[in-house]
Amino acid sequence: MSSANRRKLRSVYQRAAFSLSALLLTSCATTASNNGDLARLHLFDSSGAPRFSLWYSCAGQVSAETELCWVPSKYFTLWASERHVAIRELTTDDAFDANAGLPSAELAKSGGDVDYRIVVRFAPFATPSYTSENTGMGGFVPPKVGYQAELYVYAASDGRLIVQTDYRKKSDAPFKADSVPYIKAGVQAVLGALDPAYSSDIAGSKASVPCAERPGRSAQGCGSAH
């Protein structure tokens, strides 16, 4: 085989490997499992009344991520108010154990006669850009933003875990991009699974959040770069 043919063959292999890698990365970027199990529960009755109560928690791995927890807090609360869902925030991780479910102290605060109790653990993800010069592969590495949300559904009658699912997505973002729409999209993914009929301004997951509504560092430079 001539050297020219070998180069062509090597190029074909490289392109095929790149395409396969891109496909695998894309398939792993967004994950949602067991959505069908949620649908069969009929979380709202025929009149639109909720058949469940909801608890949620939010924390990032670093303080900058945790500061973005105002996004799920804002939109979960807005949705719960509009759809008349009883909602509580779990402020510490030890307030909930996935296998044991909610502690009795939390159950006592829930009130209402419901068929299900749902817990959502939400985690914003945001890493800054950097320049890499390791192993001779220097260059700009873009920031990454996204979310992970774990969802648990328990039968109110006996506390049994009946559905467990998760939603996650991490994306490369432009330099100095606004993280809020990416986190907001995670909230929309969860609410879309729980309540497909729900419609509000959050349905436009890329819609901007006014600067005046942003607490802390998420308001810094707001409006100057998107």
Image: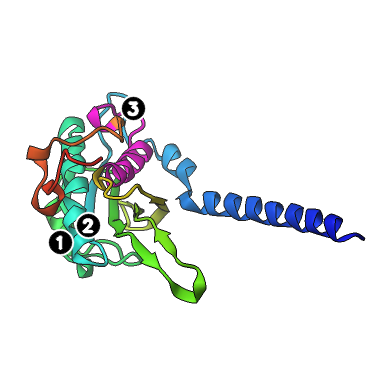
Instruction: Specify the amino acid type for callout 2.
Output: Ser
Residue closer to the observer: 74 or 96: 74
Q: Which residue is mark 1?
A: 91
**How many residues crowd around disc 3 within 10 Å: few (fewer than 14), some, or many (20 or more)?**
few
Whether residues under marks 2 and 1 lie with C-beta atoms below 8 angstroms apart, the answer is yes
The residue at 81%/55% (across/down) is 9
Majority SS type along the magenta span: helix
Whole-percent x, y for residue 16 in the image: 70, 52
Whole-percent x, y for residue 151 in the image: 35, 53
- Dividing the image into 4 quarters, which one contains the N terminus? bottom right
Q: Is residue 152 left or right of residue 108?
A: right
The residue at 30%/30% (across/down) is 204
Whether residues under marks 3 and 1 lie with C-beta atoms below 8 angstroms apart, the answer is no
- Furthest toward the top, the residue is 47
Q: Earlier in the sequence, mark 3 or mark 2?
A: 2
Residue closer to the observer: 115 or 169: 169
The residue range painted magenta reads 181-202
Q: Secondary structure at mark 3?
A: loop
Rendered view: 158 above or below 187: below
Is residue 199 rendered magenta in the image? yes
Instruction: Specify the amino acid type for callout 1.
Output: Thr
Whole-percent x, y for residue 124 in the image: 28, 55
Q: Earlier in the sequence, mark 2 or mark 1?
A: 2
Q: Which residue is mark 2?
A: 57
Q: Secondary structure at mark 2?
A: strand
Whole-percent x, y for residue 186 in the image: 33, 45
Q: Secondary structure at mark 1?
A: loop
Whole-angstrom CA distance, mark 2 to mark 1, is 6 Å
